[in-house]
Image: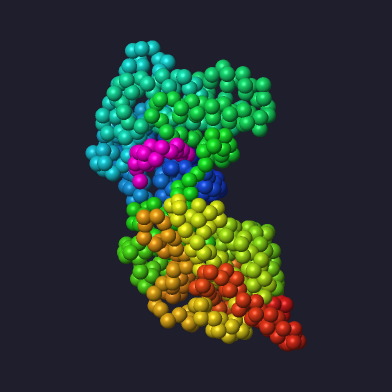
Amino acid sequence: MKITQKIRQSHKENKIWWSFEYFPPRTAQGLQNLLDRIERMRALGPEFIDITWNAGGRTSDLTAEMVKTCQGLIGIETCMHLTCTNMPMTKVDVALREAKASGCRNVLALRGDPPAGKEEWEAVEGGFVHGIDLVKHIRREYGDYFDIAVAGFPQNQLLPPEERELEMKYLKDKIDAGVDFIFTQMFYDVEVFIAWVKSVRAAGITIPIVPGIAPIQTWNGFMRATSLAKTIIPQSFLDALEPHQNDDEKVRQIGTKLVADMCRRILDEDLDIHGLHFYTMNLEKGTKMLLEELNLVPRVETIKPLPWRQSLTPNRRTETIRPIFWANRTKSYISRTENWDEYPNGRFGDSRSPAYGDLDGYGVSIKQTKEDAFKLWGEPQTFAEIATLFSRFCKNDLRALPWSDQLPASETSIISSQLARMNEYGFMTINSQPAVNGAKSEDKIFGWGPRNGYVYQKAYLEFFVNPTLLSLLLAHIERDPNITYYVINQRGDLRTNSHSDGPNAVTWGVFPGKEIIQPTIVEAVSFMAWKDEAYELGQQWARLYDAGSPSRKVISELMETSFLVNVVHNDFHNPEAIFEPFFKAGAEYAAMDKKDSAQPRVNGVNGH
């Protein structure tokens, strides 16, 4: 969505909005950490983010990659900076093509700073001389596809009259060339900002102005940033902050209140400004403190329109249904399906299609290095030790498993004790959700979708299990007509009690003025595709340990002999019903194991 559309919608709803800016880090580890931080900060409710373009264009490829990741994987509307510095027209066109392919609809067009090591700005051969040339080029080549922003400089208000009028003319010329809104440079003198906005309006410029707000993180960082940008610091700021310059925490506390007061003044003034753009400097705490001080809290609809994170690339924007199996591996699901171009009924392609990505083509891998694995999981040598790891994960006492890139979802806490008990019996759970019968869509644990709706879930469990314990379980499951299951082994032999070839909706929502939304499903063909990934992740875990080691042997044996099973309890009124057959089968198996303890058995709960 275009940023101007978001601004108009927020204005129509009389809501204040906010957004965040990030810059590409210099290292690979820094990039991964930043993407994790952007993911976390998404929960603060920004309407969009923007990614800067390094002076001199050195990180241009990284900017384009970050835009693609934020649009596609994180699912947040992203604005891409684009500068003229060191950018011939051909390179600009590549950047714009990639942005469009990623679903990006917003570009901040800048002339840019001089390249590193040079004092004066100069155009490259075949490049653009002024920011307005870049604006005209984008409009000429892409029509109205992109919202185009330019920078505004409030401190121009302090220039001598002739210079100020000339700068205003340059700004007006850019607007007339097709600019849609203005991002301002950071500032701390609110009186100067207000006067500049009024001058802009007096010049006949009516497009939205987005104030750039820089949280004060530390004294040294504050002084360095204002010095580089030649930003005027009001004496009141210096008087309040300088006595505490050696106490970062105090500086942040005082600075947060000073900047918050400035923001309130902007929003309360009659400037028709209803949003704030935060220059995060890739830091989380300062921005979060400022939002809390302003009492700006995210709206449920902004954060979670569906129970899973939507992708904003062009061919996925209308995706409304996903198989549950990839609930903990979103990136893998998007990678394996990114080349699909069929989109019937909001579902991303037909899983029977040959376009369903193969594992080999997408390089499925666990996130952890060998060193990480040893720290996280140690060197398990028995099935009982593996079961303990799974149990700890369910209790939030372990931050990852090979099948989950992140901690368990908050809803897992509702059934964590039941899951832990299942794992102790020998059911190695890798995915689950509790039954929900009409939780409000605003509910902090289960809620998603528009306000004043209700959401529902069927209880779901997915796990590895050995053949003997599986036989005991199925004997109990077959007695409950409300349970459907799929069982598959590593070879791909499938067994089920479902009499339907179609999907089974396991999550749905009912909202005012909308049809029922069913965003999460269980179905056979997707499960068969997920099976390959699930077993491969286990084998990769085994291969992190030395050949011939007890850890590699026990994990490999677990993967080779276990079945992968998913179970749905279709009576969502009874949240405990799904666990009953597991506890009965588990107790029987434990009794068998005690009785037969003299005979070793693969995957025995006692590690035999």
Q: Nearer the viewer, residue 547 or 451?
A: 451
Q: Is 301 contained in the magenta span?
A: no
Q: Position of residue 153 (x, y in %)?
A: 41, 24
The answer to whether residue 82 is visible is: no
Vertical comparison of 313 with 438: above or below: above
- Left or right relative to 9: residue 173: left
Q: What residue is at 47 percent from the left and 68 percent from the top?
A: 506
In the shown orientation, is residue 515 left or right of residue 235? left
Q: Residue at x 44, y 30 (%)?
A: 211
**Quarter in which the C terminus is drawn:** bottom right
Residue 562 vs 318, above or below: the answer is below
Q: Position of residue 558 (x, y in %)?
A: 61, 76
| Count of all numbered marks drawn on residues in the image | 0
The magenta region covers 1-20
Q: Is residue 2 magenta?
A: yes
Please name whichever residue, 573 or 526, is drawn nearer the observer in this view of the structure: 573
Q: Nearer the viewer, residue 260 or 142?
A: 260
User: Residue 101's spot in the image, x, y percent?
Assistant: 34, 51
Compared to 28, does 509 lie above or below? below
Whether residue 216 is visible, yes or no, is yes
Seen at 54% across and 34% down, the residue is 294
Q: From the top left corner, tell me how far across and down residue 425 is, in percent.
A: 67, 75
Residue at the image position 58 percent from the left and 74 percent from the top: 577
Residue 212, quarter of picture: top left
State the scheme by which the image is colored: rainbow
